Amino acid sequence: MKHIIAVHDLSGFGRCSLTVVLPTLAAMGVRAYPLLTAYLSAQTAFPAGDKAVFLDLTDAMGQVLEHWKYLNAQFDGFYSGFLGSPEQMDILTACLREYQRPGFLTLVDPVMGDNGRPYRTYTPQLCARMGELAAQADVITPNLTEAAILLGEDYDPDPSLDKATDWLRRLSLEGRRSVVLTGLSLTPSTLGAGCLDRETGEIHTFQAPLAHGRFSGTGDLFASVCLGRLLAGHSLAQATQTAVDFVARAAQAALDRGVDPLQGADFEPLLGLLTQSQ
């Protein structure tokens, strides 16, 4: 059993962030300890945002980490997703100083935007701070928008294989970290990811049949599956392929059952596939 710190928000309605991360990692034999950044009554893609409940938990994050330190908690890894402020970045930088050691796996999903635009809360300053946090990671899992932000490039929704390869190499910081580039479509009917493994320098791409629809939480699901595989000792290529295939199946399952895409991919009935293949 591996133990990781999972730094995410929690949405009460709509499956994303921790409501995706916790069951997925549990199915893969990983015990995730939530370090909550915020509580939301519903994930942000739902309408009537002015009625939403939002509780900022920045002030509690440092207290939680102090308590864990008092309890002499030990962890095998760290996984962060959406973050809301520079103060949260500072807290997590201190957290990594406390826990990083040989064998400790740090995965940062640099959640900053999608569809070519940063999220409303992500100012240029906050994007820069996310880049600083991601520089401390062993693995990052940006989508195409986030890759463009990290590189200071114009967004390209359909990069060629050569361009994706160039982005992977540059995002690796000269091979100091592994990179999984998500949302990569190399044919009109497929969607997947590319990865660069810092251990070998190898680059691989994986594609799965495209499920038409934009499902909330698929980035969280992808990163969770990838992390679970890595913690089990699989290679980055194996982890990426498993994540590509699983997310595609979960998205198609949601389409088949008529699930509202805002509710996310229909992953729960498929978790046994992850458990069986550990």
Image (tube, rainbow, N blue to C red):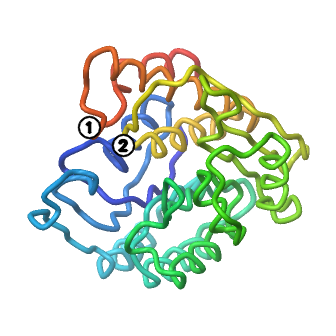
Pick the front one: 239 or 193:
193
Tell whether label 1 touches label 2 (CB within 8 Å).
Answer: yes
Give the class, few, some or many, for how many residues have Cα within 10 Å of label 1's Cα (few <14, many ≥20): some
The amino acid on which the numbered mark 2 sits, given as a three-letter code, is Ser
Residue plotted at (27% across, 57% down): 44
Where is mark 2, residue-wise? 216
Image coordinates for residue 151, horizontal then vertical, percent: 72, 68
Residue plotted at (55% across, 56% down): 109
- Residue at the extreme left: 51
Give the class, few, some or many, for how many residues have Cα within 10 Å of label 2's Cα (few <14, many ≥20): many
**Mark 2, secondary structure of its residue:** loop
Residue 263, numbered circle:
1
User: Which quadrant of the view contains residue 51?
Assistant: bottom left
Pick the front one: 185 or 221:
185
Locate the C terminus by quadrant. Answer: top right
| 20 sits to left or right of 236 | left
